[in-house]
Image (cartoon, rainbow, N blue to C red):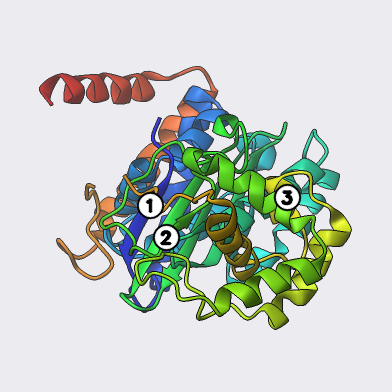
Amino acid sequence: MRTGTATLPLHGGKAPAWLFQRMRLLAREVTLVVVSEFGPDEMLRRLSDPAWFQAFGCVLGFDWHSSGVTTTVCGALKDGLAGLEHESGLVFAGGKGGTSRKTPAELREAGERVLRTDPEPLVYASRMAAKVDSSGLQDGYQIYHHTFVTTLDGRWAVVQQGMRDTDRTARRYHWLGEGVGDFVVEPHAAVTAEARASAEVLNLVAGESAGARDVVAELARMASERIGAELARLKSLELPRHHEVRLADIRPENLAKAFLATYESQPAGFEELLATPGVGPKTVRALTLISELVYDTPASRRDPAVFSYAHGGKDGHPYPVDRATYDRDIGILHEALRQAKVGRSEKLEAFRRLAALERVAG
C-alpha cells in the first residue's frame, strides 16, 4: 500500500468550466463504480495512494505534473458526490484556502445528517493531520489545501497539499486512517516525490526521532522562564556552521506565550504537544534545538519522500482534451453502474477481464 506524499510544480490558472463540469461527472461515476464493486473503504485506500491519485487526475483530463491536480480532483469529487452520501458511503469535507478551515464544521454537520458515528474523533484526526504536516514534519511547505474523506461509519483519509515558493513546487500529503497507529510515529506509510526537500527538513514524526519527541514533550512541561533562559543562553554560543536547527529565526521573547500555554496544559507526550492551541512550527523547532544541544537527542532530517493519459490535458499536453470521448466515457460508466444496480454486471466484468489482460501483457 502506497500512501505518503507527492511533490509537484506550482501551476497558475484553473480548470475551465467546461472541463470541470466533465471532471465532476466522471469523478462521480468512477467513484460510484469503485464503491459498487469494492466498497467505500477501497475508495479511501485509492485516494491515499499518491500514484493512483495522480493517475486519476490524468484520467479526468488534468495536467499530470501540475499542483492543481490536487485541488481540482478533490473539488470535483466533493462537488460531484454532494448529496449522494448514502449511495457512495462517503462524505467529503474541507478544500482549498479558507474552505479547509471549515472542515470541523462540515464534519459536525455531516454527523447530524448522515454519519453513523461521533464526528469528534474525525475532527481530531483532521486537525492532527494538518498539525503534523505543518509542525511535526517541517519540510518547507506551507499547507494550504486540506480535504478530509470519511465513510459513514468513521473510517477516513486525508489529502492535503502545501506549497514552497522558493522553487515553486507543491507537495501532497496522503493519510489513511486504518494505517495510522500513532499520529506522531511514521504516519505516512510510504512517499512518492519528484525531488527531495532541502537539508532544512526537521522530521519529528520519524521513527528515529523517538528520543527527541520525548525530550521535547518534557521541555514543554517546564516553566516558560526556564525554556526562554535556555534559548537565550544558546543564542550567545558559537555553534557549528553545519548545525541543522537554525537560531537566527528563533526569538525567545516571541515564543513566551506558546511556552506558557504548554506549561499550563502539561502535555503528556509529543502528540498532545502538537494538539495544544498556539503551538506551531517555531515552538517545536525551539524545543527541538534545546533537546539537541543540551540533552543530545537529535531529531531526524530524513525527508519522507521516497502517470497516464486517457482524455488529454488541460494545457494541451500531450494533446487537448477530447470532449467527445470524455462525454462518451462518462456515459459508459453511468450506464454500467445503472445495469450493475439491477443485477447486470457484464460491463463491469469486462472491465475486470481487461484489467487482468493488461496486467498479463505488462
Looking at the rendered structure, the secondary structure element under dot 3 is: helix
Instruction: Give percent across and percent down for residue 141.
Output: 45, 67
User: What amino acid type should be assigned to the residue bearing mark 2?
Assistant: Val
In the visual, does 161 lie left or right of 106? left
Instruction: Give percent across and percent down for residue 126.
Output: 67, 51
| Residue sitting nearer the eye, 143 or 22 | 143
| Residue sitting nearer the eye, 270 or 353 | 270
Which residue sits at x=71%, y=35%?
154
> Of label 1 and label 3, which has the lower sequence position?
3
Position of the N terminus by quadrant: top left
In the visual, does 153 lie left or right of 6? right
Tell which tag, 1 or 3, sits nearer the viewer: 3
User: What amino acid type should be assigned to the residue bearing mark 3?
Assistant: Glu
Q: Residues within 10 Å of mark 1 (few under 14, many from 20)?
A: some
Instruction: Give percent across and percent down for residue 193.
Output: 31, 52
> Of label 2 and label 1, which has the lower sequence position?
2
> Of label 3 and label 2, which has the lower sequence position?
2
Q: Which residue is mark 3?
A: 218
Q: How much space separates mark 3 and mark 2, taking CA atoms?
A: 22 Å
Q: Which residue is mark 1?
A: 303
| Residue sitting nearer the eye, 197 or 177 | 197
Q: Which residue is mark 2?
A: 201
Looking at the rendered structure, the secondary structure element under dot 1 is: loop
> Mark 3 and 2 residues: CB-CB less than 8 Å, in contact?
no
Q: How much space separates mark 1 and mark 3, taking CA atoms?
A: 25 Å
